[in-house]
Image (cartoon, rainbow, N blue to C red):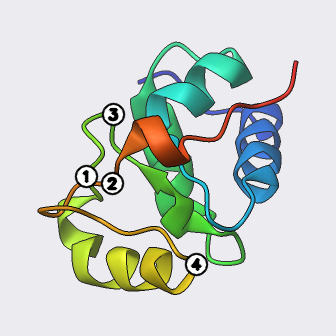
């Protein structure tokens, strides 16, 4: 992976911060909207700099939380009214569309 720039980090942080309660976005959605080449870059940024963000609102394209965060992420989403079915979030119902 190429070095991540401060500008990329700030774009991802701003997008994650803008996801409202009760909605989710995928790593791929954020990467696409931020002009990044891969959802993995978003994952990397989230790992290093997201403690003060609503990180739990970012999930995989399959609608599942990250494996190492599943229990906590689903708890936080449930508290916002986002319910999982068989461990999967219904993206067609709660996926956030970033404004153009």
Q: Earlier in the sequence, mark 3 or mark 4?
A: 3
Residue identifier under label 3: 61
What's the distance in space between the residues labelled 3 and 1, CA to CA? 7 Å
Asked whether, in this view, residue 25 is left or right of residue 10, the answer is left
Specify whether residue 3 is in view. Answer: no
Depth order, front residue of 70/7: 70
Q: CA distance from mark 2 to mark 4?
A: 13 Å
User: Nearest the camera: 2 or 11?
Assistant: 11
Q: Which residue corresponds to mark 4? A: 80
* Residue drawn at the location 41% of the way across and 24% of the way down: 1
> Image height check: is 37 above or below 28?
above
Q: Are the residues at dot 2 and dot 1 in contact (C-beta closer than 8 Å)?
A: yes
Q: Residue at position x 33%, y 33% from top?
A: 61
Q: Nearer the viewer, residue 50 or 1?
A: 50
Of callouts 2 and 1, the N-terminal one:
1
Checking the image for residue 64, the label placed there is: 1
Instruction: Quote the CA–CA distance across marks 2 and 1.
Output: 6 Å
Q: Which is closer to the viewer, label 3 or label 4?
A: 4
Q: Secondary structure at mark 4?
A: loop
Mark nearer the viewer, 3 or 2: 2
Instruction: Tell me which numbered mark, 2 or 4, is placed earlier along the sequence.
Output: 4
The residue beneath circle 2 is 89
Taking the image as shown, residue 6 lies to the left or right of residue 90, namely: right
Badge count: 4
Residue 29 vertical placement versus 14 (above, below): above
Proximity of marks 3 and 4: CB atoms separated by less than 8 Å: no
**Mark in front: 2 vs 1:** 2
């Amino acid at each position: 992976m190429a070095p991540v720039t401060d500008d990329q980090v700030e774009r991802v942080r701003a997008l994650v911060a803008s996801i409202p309660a009760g909605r989710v976005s995928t790593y791929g959605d954020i990467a696409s909207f931020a002009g990044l080449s891969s959802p993995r870059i978003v994952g990397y940024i989230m790992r290093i700099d997201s403690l003060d963000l609503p990180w739990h609102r970012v999930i995989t394209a399959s609608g599942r939380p990250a494996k190492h965060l599943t229990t906590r992420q689903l708890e936080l989403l449930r508290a916002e009214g986002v319910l999982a079915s068989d461990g999967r979030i219904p993206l067609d119902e709660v996926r956030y569309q970033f404004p153009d």
